[in-house]
Amino acid sequence: MKRRAIYPGSFDPITNGHLDVVERALRLFDEVVVAVAVNIRKDPLFSVKERREMLQRAVGHLPRVTVDSFETLLMDYAQEKKAVAVVRGLRAVSDFEFEFQMALMNRNLAPQVETVFLMPKDNYVYLSSRMIKEIVRLGGSAKGFVPPYVETALQRRLGKGGRR
């Protein structure tokens, strides 16, 4: 039986830190599903379709990674996909408190699905999608923080003349 993990997130947009976590997860699992979580409480910059396309482009060269999206409870989705684990990236202690609470709740909802925390390379620890969007919004460059095509999409959307 293949050991499948779900790596959920908003990925608005995907960063090099996210990609590093995907590559680390591949060392532990036979398959990784990178899944865009649809959150009606958030106002994303990119549509689910756009985020899935960016993800597919970012991980398309990795044969054991698939891209998907879901609007259900994460644990319901994980069970539907027959996942043995949910992968979560941790950048700092501040991430841990929220992620710890979520992991405990998820364990109550689906005890057979483990939560695995992975840390990205130290040169990606400070990265967040929100921070990158703010840098571009204020005229800065996202080069080195996101794949080049994501940087282009951010510049179109947020750079001079962008909509937000």
Image (cartoon, rainbow, N blue to C red):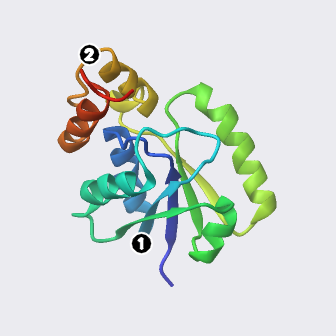
Q: Position of residue 50 (x, y in %)?
A: 35, 52
Sort mark 2 into few (<14), some (14-19) or many (20+) by Cα contacts within 10 Å: few
Q: Where is residue 122 in the image (x, y as percent from the top left)?
A: 37, 30
Q: Is residue 28 left or right of residue 76?
A: left
Q: Is mark 1 on a helix, strand or loop?
A: loop
Circle 2 or circle 1, nearest the eye: 2
Quarter occupied by residue 98: top right
- Mark 2 and mark 1: Cα distance apart in space: 41 Å
Q: How many labels does the image show?
A: 2
Q: Which mark is residue 132?
A: none
Q: Which mark is residue 30?
A: 1
Task: Say which label, 2 or 1, has the lower sequence index.
Answer: 1
Sort mark 1 into few (<14), some (14-19) or many (20+) by Cα contacts within 10 Å: some
Q: What residue type is labelled 2?
A: Gly
Residue 103 or residue 151, whichever sits in front: 151
Q: In this view, does 88 lie to the left or right of 62?
A: right
Compared with 146, 108 (above or below) is below
Residue 40 or residue 8, whichever sits in front: 40
Q: Position of residue 136 (x, y in %)?
A: 30, 23
Q: Is residue 15 left or right of residue 4?
A: left
Residue positioned 58% across, 58% down in the render: 86
Q: Which amino acid does label 1 sit on?
A: Asp
The residue identified by callout 2 is 139
Quarter occupied by residue 79: bottom right
Task: Tell which residue pokes out farthest to the top in this image.
Answer: 138
Q: Position of residue 27 (x, y in %)?
A: 38, 60
Q: Is mark 2 on a helix, strand or loop?
A: loop
